[in-house]
Amino acid sequence: MNLAFIGLGNMGAPMAGNLARAGHHVAGFDPAAPVPDGVRHAPGAAEAARDAEVVLTMLPDGAILRAVAAQILPAMRPGAVLCDCSTVDVDSARAVAAEAAAAGIDALDAPVSGGTVGAAAGTLTFMVGGSDAGVATVTPLLDIMGQRVVHCGGAGAGQAAKICNNMILGVTMIATCEAFALADRLGLDRARLYDVVSTSSGQSWSATSYCPAPGVGPQSPADNGYRPGFAAELMLKDLRLSQQAAEAVDADTPMGARAAELYAQFVESEDGRGRDFSAMLPRFTSRRRA
Ligand code: NAD
C-alpha cells in the first residue's frame, strides 16, 4: 500500500520501519527526527499524506494531532484512512474524527501499549476506535506493527480504553510499591511477600509481571536500576489524560486523581523524571509517614 507516517520519534520510527520492511511504500515526515531506513522522506506532512491510502500519525499530544490533521486532511484522497496511534485526549480524537468525516475521510484512534520495545519488535497492542470499514482497512498494517488489535468501539473508544487501562496500572503500581515498602518496615522478606501476593488476591500485572522490587519475580526495570521501561513521566501523561476525561464526563475517580498527584510530585519535584514508573518503590522506602 501507499502509506504516510507522520511523527518519527521513539515509537513512530520503528513502527514506520516495520511497515517499510514488510514491503509497503512509506512516505515519512517529522520536523525534528530522521526518517528510518526504507522510508522516503517527504518535505512536509501534507506532501507525505497526498498519495497515501492510509496515513498513520504518532505524535506527542492532542494539540499537535489537531494541528497536523488540519494540514493533512485537505491534502488526503477521499476514501483514505487516517489512523492516529498517539496517546491523546478523547476530545481531540473525536474532534479529528469529526473533521475527517466532513472531508470524506475515515479516522481511527489506535493508541498502543507495549512501548519502544514492542514498537521495535512489532509486538504492540492496538486499542482502536472508529468504523468497522476503517478497522478492516488498517488491521493488516496493525498486524505488522503489533500482535493484538482490539476494536473498542466508535471514535475515541481506543483512547478511552488506553486511559482506563493505564489508570488501573498507575494505581496498582502505587499500591504495590506502598505494600513492599510497608513490608520492609515490618521486617517481611520481599521475596516471601511476592510469593504470597503473586498467588493471592493482591496480585496484579504491576506486582506479578513487573514487580517493582529488584531481584524478585521476573526480570523487570527494577533489575536494571529502574531504567525505563515505561517512564514515570509517560505514566503521568496518561494519568492526567484520565483525569481530564473524568472531569469532562463527571466521573468520580479518586484513586486515579491521587495517583496523578503522586506521579506529578515524583516527576516534577523529586527524582522521578527519566526513571521507570516502578521507581515509586525506592521513593516510598526513602520516606517516612506523612
Ligand atoms: P517522541 O517525542 O519520541 O516522538 C514524537 C515525534 O513527533 C517527535 O519526533 C516530534 O518531532 C514529532 N512531531 C512533533 N510535532 C510534529 C508535527 N507537527 N509534525 C510531524 N511530527 C511532529 O514520542 P514517542 O515516545 O514516540 O511517543 C509518541 C506517542 O506515543 C505519544 O503520544 C506517547 O504518549 C505514545 N506512547 C509512547 C510510548 C513510549 O513508551 N514511548 C508508549 C505508548 C504510547
Image (cartoon, rainbow, N blue to C red):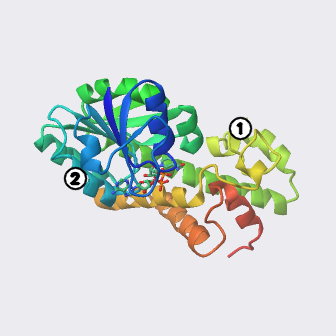
| Relative to 259, 85 lies left or right | left
| Camera sees residue 290 | yes
Amino acid type indicated by mark 2: Gln
Q: Is residue 40 above or below residue 144?
A: below
Ligand 1 has an atom within 8 Å of the beta carbon of the residue at disc 1: no
Q: Nearer the viewer, residue 174 or 44?
A: 44
The residue carrying pointer 2 sits among few (fewer than 14), some (14 to 19) or many (20 or more) residues within 10 Å by Cα, namely some
Q: Is residue 257 above or below residue 202?
A: below
Report the residue marked by disc 1. Answer: 200
Q: Residue at coordinates 71% horizontally, 66% vertically from top-left? A: 283
Of circles 1 and 2, which is in front?
Answer: 2
Q: Quadrant of residue 210?
A: top right
Q: Residue at coordinates 49% horizontally, 45% vertically from top-left? A: 11
Q: Is residue 66 above or below residue 283?
A: above
The residue carrying pointer 1 sits among few (fewer than 14), some (14 to 19) or many (20 or more) residues within 10 Å by Cα, namely few
Q: Which mark is residue 175?
A: none
Q: Residue at coordinates 31% horizontally, 53% vertically from top-left? A: 65
Q: Secondary structure at mark 2?
A: helix
The x, y position of residue 100, in whole percent, is 18, 43
Report the residue marked by disc 2. Answer: 71
Q: Secondary structure at mark 1?
A: loop
